[in-house]
Amino acid sequence: MVEYEETKVRLDRSVPRSAVRKLLTDQAEYGGWELTRLRRYRDGTRDVWIRRKIIRVPLTV
């Protein structure tokens, strides 16, 4: 079974779209995160859910 680590990021309305794209691209490229959901509200704030796989190394005795 695949396990994921998930996190939610709230972005203020003052953050431009290009900065959001750059942030998410950097997280995906360097941190292994993938976009799960993005929600934009009427006031301009955004909630972004990202996740990445948890890789467990089996213990050998």
Image (tube, grey):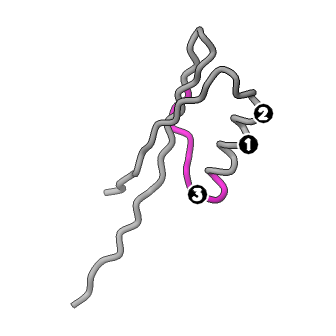
Amino acid type of the residue that numbered disc 2 sits on in the rendered structure: Ser
Residue 18, x across and y down, in percent: 78, 33
Label for residue 10? none
Q: Amino acid at mark 1?
A: Lys
Part of the protein shown in magenta: 28-38
Q: Which mark is residue 22?
A: 1
Cα distance in 3D space between marks 1 and 2: 6 Å
Q: CA distance from mark 2 to mark 3?
A: 19 Å
Q: Are marks 1 and 2 in contact (CB under 8 Å)?
A: yes
Residue 37 sits inside the magenta stretch: yes
**Number of marks present in the image shown:** 3
Residue shown at 68% from the left, 43% from the top: 23
Q: Nearer the viewer, residue 9 or 54?
A: 9
Q: Which residue is mark 3?
A: 31
Q: Residue furthest right?
A: 18
Q: Give the structural element (helix, strand or loop) at label 3.
A: helix
Q: Residue at x 72, y 37 (%)?
A: 21
Where disc 1 sits, the SS reads: helix
| Percent position of residue 34, x then y | 56, 46
For mark 2, give the secondary structure.
Answer: helix
Q: Residue at x 27, y 81 (%)?
A: 59
